[in-house]
Image: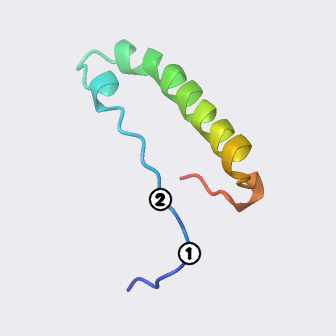
Amino acid sequence: FLKKSDYNVILVDWEPLASSTFYLGPMQNTGKVGEQAGKFIDYLIEQTGAKPEDMHFI
């Protein structure tokens, strides 16, 4: 059961960087993905006034 609310959901699709069957490739890309996600979060905070304390990451 889902309850309607005022929220946004943002997904990170990093499949092209995670699709290698060799473990070291995707492992090394996790830092790149995290860095870009962090830049996007910074952008949201700076441009929209979003508050970090209102954000939840899973």
Circle 2 sits on which residue? 9
Q: Amino acid at mark 2?
A: Val
Farthest residue toward the front?
A: 47
Quadrant of the frame with the N terminus: bottom left
Q: Nearer the viewer, residue 19 or 11?
A: 11
Q: Is residue 51 left or right of residue 40?
A: right
Q: Secondary structure at mark 2?
A: loop
User: In the figure, residue 54 lies in which quadrant?
Assistant: bottom right
Q: Is residue 4 left or right of residue 47?
A: left
Does 13 appear above or below 29?
A: below
Circle 1 sits on which residue? 6
Residue 34: give x, y in percent of width and height.
55, 30
Q: Secondary structure at mark 1?
A: loop
Q: Name which residue lies at 47% across and 51% down.
A: 10
Does 53 appear above or below 29?
A: below
Q: Nearer the viewer, residue 58 or 12?
A: 12
User: In the figure, residue 51 lies in which quadrant?
Assistant: bottom right
